Image: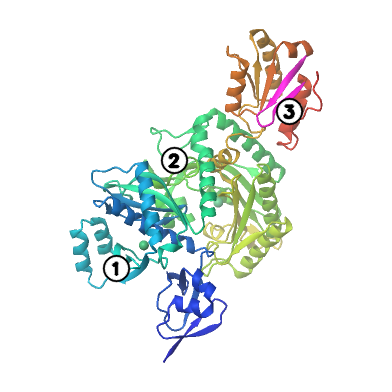
Amino acid sequence: MSEITIILPDGSQKQLPQGATGKTLAESIGAGLAKAAIAITLNDEVRDLNTPLPDHVKVRIITAKDPEALDVLRHSSAHILAQAVQTLFPQAKIGNGPPIETGFYYDFEIPNHKLTPEDLEKIEAEMARIISEGQVFQRYEVTDVDAKLQEFMAAGEKYKAQNLNQYRNDHPTLYYCVDPNSQKPVWQDFCKGPHLPDTSFIKAFKLLSLAGAYWHGDEKNEMLQRVYATSFFDKKELDAFLQQREEAEKRDHRRIGKQLDLFSIEDEVGPGLILWHPNLAVIREEIENYWRKEHRKRGYDLVYCPHIAKKDLWNISGHTSFYMENMFPLEVDGQDYILKPMNCPFHVLIYKSQLRSYRDLPLRLGELGTVYRYEKSGVMHGMTRVRGFTQDDAHLFCRPDQLTEEISGIIKFIDDTLKLFNMTFEVELSTRPEKYVGELAIWDKAEQGLKEALDLYGLTYEINEGDGAFYGPKIDFKLKDAIGRTWQCATVQLDFNLPERFGLKYQDSDGSHKVPVMLHRVIFGSMERFAGTLIEHFSGAFPTWLSPLQVMILPISDRHVEQAKIYAAALLEEEVRAKVDERNEGIGHKIRDAQLEKHPYMLILGDKELESNTVSVRSRSRGDLGSLPFEAFQTQLLQEIKSHGQKEITIAEPAKA
Ligand SMILES: [Zn+2]
Ligand SMILES: [Zn+2]
């Protein structure tokens, strides 16, 4: 009997009988693996476990622990969801049901019925029943597409038929759910897989929510009913997911944004365009003040540039050839303009406005530059996915021999800044891809410089080999927030392309003209997304230095208001944001409101405090701190603000027993 040779991930080879599948391979390695195996990769493409293995292919066995496993599980779970819905609602027609980051969904058309939360419970019960049967997923290649189309149309499955017809020349496949007892298919879907061997691998699932969704995302099409769900290989993972989801919902910046009057998005303005209300504007102002001061300290020059530029500029930069669909074009006096999607070309032209000598370098140009990028309306999300945003952008121009030092400086800057917000982060370095511009020696030097700088500051990082842009390697910083989610934030990007395109030069010590190295850099990324991240990270309870209102003074009755106003004025004089709650409400009520509004400090003022010239201090997070003279409170508060929260207000002993 002839044999085939397959190549294992460690490079070793294995002989297997002709006709062997992934399952045969797993069994030949060990019983434990045979039990845990759920799929394979054939030359890095995920396939069903029982796929027959061709000769001389790279094969890897996927178990629940592998990153690809979750998609296979969720894709399979989606079939079970659809089968359950069609069992309970025989009139239901199915649309698409892909896996997504948080789980999976399925779209249905259900004539004369709108799914309710109670339906979801029934569907879950039916899914549990199907899963317990251990139905087998079986792949079937469609040979007679027209016959299958007719069958789908006769069953009223017009969406499935549309899909099949669209892929009719791509070797379309169906997947059957097969009853293990009768060996008969009980359900089928047009699908290219791959799937689990059988439903018993689905150990934990949950239906999450209902929504409306247009067929193929097009509002001219039918509106279908979407069921969102998730599944895991392990009940504990599901519980952790549900808990994080609940926590994330509580922290949702759109919800807190409304509660604390931070921002809004108005129909009249347009989607993805943020109105910063006074409370959030204060936070931005604090961050910008810090940002400007630090840039000056670190040798940057700050600039301002317009919001539009002639289309010609974007031709030179190359954006019109690969970025046009993300840009907002304008026409003025018969001249084409574009709303700027990036600040880089402007800074490049400032560099180019005079002849630069090697002694002028590095030149570091920074700008809080507002840019506009077209995003589809379906993908926009609060402040984190928008069409207009302000980048805390900087471009550095240096000589090759200055590169390592410049990169170190940027990384220290990013590290120092993100620490202010009590956020940890993950770092990824993306290196030279196969197709690249620029000189190999400079690429090597740049990548070496990026690594050295990361090592210097003790930052651990992941290397994405070959994942850099064609014009330069880059470092990405991903913030980890208080509940462990990651957010895109700072980037350091080298650019060997724009200096060439714009013909940038500097005069070296020997009089010759050379091309400078250019770096793009953001720390927060976008002020909008960063603010959204901060709202969720702090759950709206911003540290004192950032809080829209830092001290709320609460007079117990009318006769304490006058002194409260004197204190408020004294705090304002020191640039502390303070206010008096003069409402005619009980003190309990006032404290509760201040607490809900998440002000870091409350000063309570009554007869006792007036007599002893003290204030009773209440902290948002630590409760009643006792009382102390107003001046002592003010001194400590200023220290806390100035140190960005490194020093908190403490009261050693109450002023009065
Ligand atoms: Zn499928
Ligand atoms: Zn740039």
Image position of 422 (left or right of 222): right
Identify which residue is drawn at 23% across, 57% down: 157
Residue 348 spot, x, y in % from top left: 56, 51
Q: In the image, what residue type sits under mark 2?
A: Gly
- Reply yes or no: does residue 621 show up in magenta: yes
**Distance from label 2 to label 3 (Cα)?**
37 Å
Q: In the image, what residue type sits under mark 3?
A: Leu
Q: Earlier in the sequence, mark 2 or mark 1?
A: 1
Asked whether the residues under the numbered discs 1 and 3 touch, taking CB atoms below 8 Å apart as contact, a structural biologist would say no
Identify which residue is drawn at 67% across, 26% down: 601
- Reply yes or no: does residue 130 show up in magenta: no
**Distance from label 2 to label 1 (Cα)?**
51 Å
Q: Which mark is residue 637?
A: 3
Q: Is residue 248 visible?
A: yes
Q: Can you name the residue that lies furthest to the top here?
A: 559
**Distance from label 1 to label 3 (Cα)?**
74 Å
Name the residue tied to disc 2: 272
Residue 622 spot, x, y in % from top left: 69, 31
Residue 406 spot, x, y in % from top left: 68, 55
In the rendered view, tell whether residue 51 sits above or below residue 470.
Answer: below
- Image quarter for ligand 1: bottom left
Q: Which span is picked out in magenta?
A: 613-627
Q: Which mark is residue 317?
A: none
Q: Which mark is residue 184?
A: 1
Is the shortest distance between ligand 2 and the CB of mark 2 under 8 Å? Answer: no
Question: Which is more toward the observer, 461 or 16?
Answer: 16
Question: Which is more toward the observer, 231 or 432?
Answer: 231
In the rendered view, tell whether residue 101 sits above or below residue 384.
Answer: below
